[in-house]
Every structure is written in C-alpha cells, then in structure tokens.
Image (cartoon, rainbow, N blue to C red):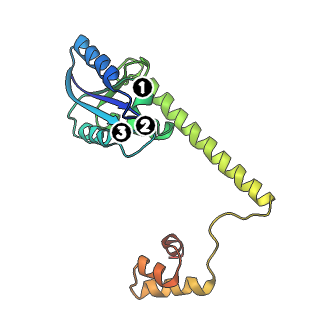
Amino acid sequence: MRVGIYARVSRESSSNDNQLLILREYCTKMGYDIYAEYVDIVSGGSSNRIEFNRMMVDASKRKYDMLLFYALDRFSRQGLRITIQHLQSLESYGVSYKSYSEQYIDSAGIFGDVIIALLATLAKQERIRLSERVHAGLARARQQGRIGGRPKLDDKTVDKIKIMKADGYSIVDISKKLKVSRSSVYQYL
C-alpha cells in the first residue's frame, strides 16, 4: 500500500520530527510504502497550507492509497464541517485515511463507514446550531429596533439595472455606474 504522510506544526520553533518518526516507524511495521511526506509549518486553521494542498492534489490523482496523519488536529483545525469535507474529498478520490493516535478515525477499518456517517452527522448538527444562532441574533436585533440585511434598491435604480443589462452592459459595469454591489445587481436581474 502506498501511503502519504501528513505532518503539521504551528510554529517554526516546533518540530515535525516526532510526528514523522512515529508515522515512518508505523509504516515500516505495517509494511507500507511511503509515497510522500507532506509537512506544513502553519496553523491548522489556515486554508493556505501549501503542503496540505499538494497532498490533496496528489490524492485526487490517486498517487497514494492511504493518508496517514498523527492526529486529527494535526490534519486540520478549520472546524468540523471543513475538516469533514477534506476527509470526504479523500474518500471520493478513493484514498483512505487514518489517524495514528485516534484509532477510531480510520476509513479503511471495519468501522470506516460508521465514522464517516458520525462525522457527517456532527457537521450537520454544527450547521443547524450555527443557523439557530444566526436566527436568534437577528431576532434580538429586531427587538432592539435594528433591521438586518441588505437595504432594498429603489424602483428607479432597479429599472436602470434592467435597462442597462438589456443594452448589453456587464454586471461589473452596471455595478460601477450605479454604485451598487454586484450581488445587488444579480438580485434584481
């Protein structure tokens, strides 16, 4: 089995060596061939991780069969939903994944489907809770007399948007000429 190893630390002063030594030793013990090691020195909450992105591209090309990481928080700290999206992307590429220190996070194991279903359910619950918090905040703002959302455009501006679009103006040009956001222009087309 070809394995990609992912290791990450948050600061230059930290060292990936411990993670890498343990993961290499594990691969040797299991008889896995290490295809590549992807090592980032950046916060796990950042979406700008060069080696992480290279790892995902290689996974999409099936350059390795399994991704091995030391712990889920070393893999990603971008929040439950995004982390699960990354794991689901690996699955869709046909690449399994395994956390060395959290044996239950193993898509190749006998409970792989259960773990994926559980993580997806947790992500769904997080989205529901976020939606509830947003609705509660909007309700509180309304009670305090504040009205949220984008202000509606007057009829004259809406008519200008439609005429300009019919005359062949682009969304960007309409937005600039009328001094309204592009999303507002889209909303009234």
Task: Count neighbours of disc 1 (C-alpha within 10 A) and say few if under 14, some if 14 to 19, many if 20 or more.
Answer: few
Residue found 64% across the figure and 64% down from its top = 149
Q: Earlier in the sequence, mark 2 or mark 3?
A: 2
Task: Count neighbours of disc 3 (C-alpha within 10 A) and say few if under 14, some if 14 to 19, many if 20 or more.
Answer: some
Q: Quadrant of the N terminus?
A: top left
Residue type marked 1 = Asp
Kindly identify which residue carries mark 3.
89
Residue found 64% across the figure and 72% down from its top = 151
Kindly identify which residue carries mark 2.
44
Dividing the picture into quadrants, the one containing residue 39 is: top left
**Secondary structure under badge 3?**
helix
Dividing the picture into quadrants, the one containing residue 62 is: top left
- Residue 37, position in %: x, y? 25, 30
Task: Count neighbours of disc 2 (C-alpha within 10 A) and say few if under 14, some if 14 to 19, many if 20 or more.
Answer: many
**Secondary structure under badge 1?**
helix
Nearer the observer: mark 2 or 3; the answer is 2
Nearer the observer: mark 3 or 1; the answer is 3
Residue found 62% across the figure and 68% down from its top = 150
Residue found 75% across the figure and 55% down from its top = 139
Task: Report, in whole angstroms, how far the alpha carbon at label 1 lies from the one at label 2.
Answer: 25 Å
Kindly identify which residue carries mark 1.
113
Residue type marked 2 = Gly
- Residue 7, position in %: x, y? 33, 29
Q: Earlier in the sequence, mark 1 or mark 2?
A: 2
Would residue 60 be found to the left or right of residue 153 on screen?
A: left
Residue type marked 3 = Ser
